[in-house]
Image (spheres, grey):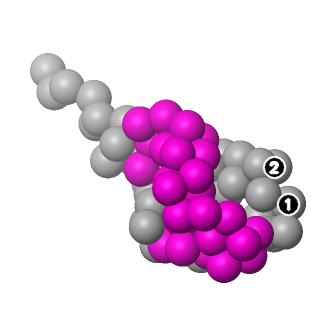
Amino acid sequence: MTSPTPAAANPTTIEATRHALSKDIHTKWNKFSETDAAAFKNRDDLVTQVVSKYGMDKAIAQRDVDALLKGRSF
């Protein structure tokens, strides 16, 4: 008997997780569309864009991004 494929390896699950993250980013920072949010490559990219778009201090942006991600990754 084979074990089931891990959820992390399932493209449908990965896509659903990515979509949920994009929606969460858009909800938190509504100046980013869901399409913009889906284009972010990683945490640092998101922090840089939040700083740029909102004129926010980098340390505050990092804290807010970390809080939103809560262990999730891109």
Q: Say what amino acid the circle numbered 1 marks.
A: Asn
Q: Main secondary structure of the magenta part?
A: helix
Q: Which residue is mark 2?
A: 27
Q: Is residue 33 above or below residue 29?
A: below
Please say if the residues under marks 2 and 1 sit with CB atoms less than 8 Å apart: yes
Report crowding for label 1: few under 14, some 14 to 19, many 20 or more residues within 10 A (C-alpha). Answer: few
| Lateral position of residue 4 relative to residue 52, left or right | left
Alpha carbons under labels 2 and 1: distance apart: 6 Å
Give me the disc on residue 30: 1
Q: Residue 68 occupies which quadrant of the picture? A: top right
In the picture as drawn, the residue positioned furthest to the top comes out as 1
Q: Residue at x 55, y 38 (%)?
A: 67
Question: Where's residue 63, x and y in %?
Answer: 52, 45
Query: Is residue 50 visible in the rendered structure shown here?
Result: no
Q: Residue at x 19, y 25 (%)?
A: 3
Q: Is residue 55 above or below residue 2?
A: below
The secondary structure type at the circle numbered 1 is loop
Tell me where the magenta segment starts and ends, as one range.
45-73
Q: Tell me if residue 64 is in the magenta stretch.
A: yes
Q: Residue at x 16, y 27 (%)?
A: 2
Query: Is residue 31 visible in the rendered structure shown here?
Result: yes
The secondary structure type at the circle numbered 2 is helix
